[in-house]
Amino acid sequence: MGRAWQCSTLQADFFMPQNFDVNYINNKGEKQHPVILHQALLGSMERFFGIILENFKGHLPFWLCPTQIKVIPITEKQLEYANKIAKTLKAKNLRVEIDESNEPLSAKIKVAQLEKIPWMIVLGQKEQDANTLTLRLSDGKQEMGLTLDTICKRAENANAI
């Protein structure tokens, strides 16, 4: 949007020391109220997250997403395979959810896209039989026939900041 934001602040506070009766003894041996400096490097958390969300247009970087990967089994038959995949990914400290709904694949993908989840792992019978994965990115790009190890390495790189 091209606008400037004020984030960091540093404020000199002359009133709080008086209100809380905060004193020190100066070099003349007299009580004196200090000046308190307040700093907020990122501003308020609300403002910081507002700036982040606006900057990325709601599509947070992979490392910052609350849910990084959604595992989407095409049918109930792939649910056990999906749980195995999710368990391995979670062991790598990735934030993973499984879509266990009985919705059609297109609806499951649409929900994940609306939730702005960056990676979707789509599992059908073909993937289960070959012990591979199909990775679908939030921008619609798709790679088929990937191994779980490949996905784990990519996720590790995507999490590195």
Image: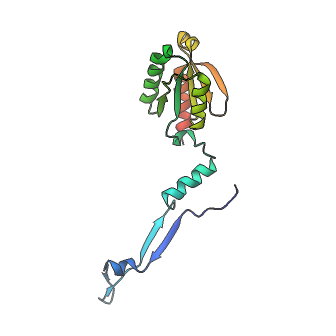
Q: Residue furthest front?
A: 103
Q: Outermost residue, top direction?
A: 129
Rendered position, 111 above or below 17? above
Q: Residue at x 44, y 72 (%)?
A: 37
Residue 130 % position (x, y): 56, 10
Q: How many numbered discs sit on the rendered protein?
A: 0
Quarter of the figure with residue 104: top right
- Quadrant of the rendering where the N terminus is positioned: bottom right
Q: Please provide percent x and percent y for residue 79.
A: 47, 18
Left or right: 126, with 39 as reference point: right
Residue 94 vs 131, above or below: the answer is: below
Left or right, residue 13 beside residue 109:
left
Residue located 54% across and 58% down the image: 47
Question: In the depicted view, which residue is nearer to us: 43 or 72?
Answer: 72
Q: Position of residue 121 (x, y in %)?
A: 56, 25
In the image, taking residue 11 as reference, residue 136 lies left or right, namely: right
Q: Position of residue 155 (x, y in %)?
A: 54, 32
Locate the C terminus and report the quarter of the image it occupies: top right
Q: Nearer the viewer, residue 130 or 102?
A: 102
In the displayed structure, 149 sits above or below 51; it is: above
Indicate the colouring scheme.
Answer: rainbow
Q: Farthest residue in the right direction? A: 2
The quarter holding residue 125 reads top right
